[in-house]
Image (cartoon, rainbow, N blue to C red):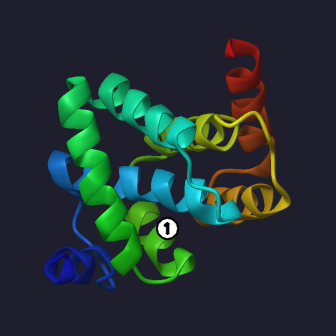
Amino acid sequence: MFADFLKRLTAPQPDPLADADARLALTALLVRVARADAHYDASEQARIDRIAANRFGLSPFEASKLRGKAEALEAEAPDTVRFTRAIKDAVPYEDRIGVIEALWQVVLADGQREAEEDALLRLVSNLLGVSDRDSALARQRVDSAS
């Protein structure tokens, strides 16, 4: 279903993503992080929906529909390294810091920080070209807003 999209996303020199494609790719990354600890629950799904609604100006219904598509994309997406590097190449740096904040929101949605989630967030931050310091600052901003 997403084969053409994934092929474009993981091309050696991907073109910048159209808004709809960027939304889908970034939401799929949120889903991947939420699934990292093998406990993808309703609180994480609701948090992803809220992030998508706020970040992309979607209604709750549209955000839920986007998450459903992102869940399917995430299941078909290549390994995290290639998938995340493709997003890095297609998304401006300042937007990637916002992505890290959104990822921390998802990790912290269930009130627990699992080792698998922390490890994946470190990897994703690095692959997105966001420093450990910037990721830690993003986590602190999310933590203090909770």
Q: Position of residue 33 (x, y in %)?
A: 58, 57
Q: Could you tell me which residue is drawn at 43 percent across and 83 percent down?
A: 78
| Most foreground residue, 104 or 36 | 36
**Residue annotated with mark 1:** 84
Q: Could you tell me which residue is drawn at 14 percent across and 81 percent down?
A: 4
Q: Position of residue 83 (x, y in %)?
A: 44, 73
Instruction: Give the structural element (helix, strand or loop) at label 1.
Output: helix
Relative to 85, 60 lies left or right? left
Give the residue furthest to the right. Answer: 115
Relative to 130, 112 lies left or right? right
Residue 56, quarter of picture? top left
| Most foreground residue, 35 or 51 | 35
Q: Could you tell me which residue is drawn at 70 percent across and 66 percent down?
A: 123
Q: Is residue 127 above or below residue 105?
A: below
Q: Could you tell me which residue is drawn at 75 percent across and 33 percent down?
A: 111
| Most foreground residue, 50 or 101 | 50
Total numbered labels placed on residues in the image: 1
Q: Looking at the picture, which amino acid does disc 1 mark?
A: Thr
Residue 135, quarter of picture? top right
Residue 11, quarter of picture? bottom left
The answer to whether residue 120 shows anywhere in this view is yes
The answer to whether residue 57 shows anywhere in this view is no
Give the residue furthest to the front. Answer: 42
Pointer 1 local density, CA inside 10 Å: few below 14, some 14–19, many at least 20? many
Relative to 34, 67 lies left or right? left
Q: Is residue 124 above or below residue 98?
A: below
Q: Position of residue 41 (x, y in %)?
A: 56, 47
Q: Quadrant of the C terminus?
A: top right
Q: Quadrant of the N terminus?
A: bottom left
Q: Position of residue 35 (x, y in %)?
A: 57, 61
Q: Is residue 28 above or below residue 15?
A: above
Give the residue furthest to the top. Answer: 145
